[in-house]
Image (cartoon, rainbow, N blue to C red):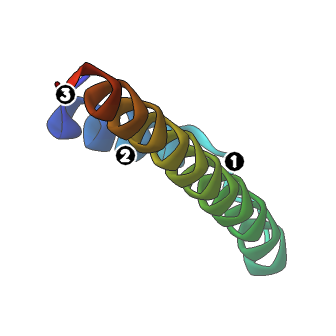
Amino acid sequence: MNSEHIKDRLHKAIHRTPRDVSQKELEEVTAIVLAIVLELGAETALVLGELATRIEVLESAQKP
């Protein structure tokens, strides 16, 4: 998926919501989504760090 596709889907989803959604409910959902994104970013950083370490070990083992 490209960023335009994601933006378009988000825009359509926002406009499909009922008009009676309160600002507080929207803020709560936004906070949850933000927490999920932050957690995903942290997990991704850990995985990339582990991969980088493994690559360094493999590269150092191949040096004569």
Label 1 element class: loop
Residue 11, disc:
2
Residue 44 in the figure: left or right of residue 35 = left
Q: Are marks 3 and 2 in contact (CB under 8 Å)?
A: no
**Quick one: label 1 or label 3, which is nearer the N terminus?**
1
Crowdedness near tag 2: few (<14), some (14–19) or many (≥20) residues, C-alpha within 10 Å: few
In space, the residues marked 2 and 1 are separated at their CA atoms by 14 Å
Residue 48: horizontal and vertical position, in percent? 45, 43
Q: Which residue is mark 1?
A: 18
Q: Which residue is mark 3?
A: 63
In space, the residues marked 3 and 2 are separated at their CA atoms by 52 Å
Q: Amino acid at mark 1?
A: Pro
Label 3 element class: loop
Nearer to us in this view, 33 or 47: 47
Q: Nearer the viewer, mark 1 or mark 3?
A: 3
Q: Residue at x 62, y 62 (%)?
A: 38
**Quick one: label 2 or label 1, which is nearer the N terminus?**
2
In space, the residues marked 1 and 3 are separated at their CA atoms by 62 Å
**Quarter placement of the C terminus:** top left
Residue 57 in the figure: left or right of residue 28 = left
Residue 61: horizontal and vertical position, in percent? 34, 25
Q: Are marks 1 and 3 in contact (CB under 8 Å)?
A: no
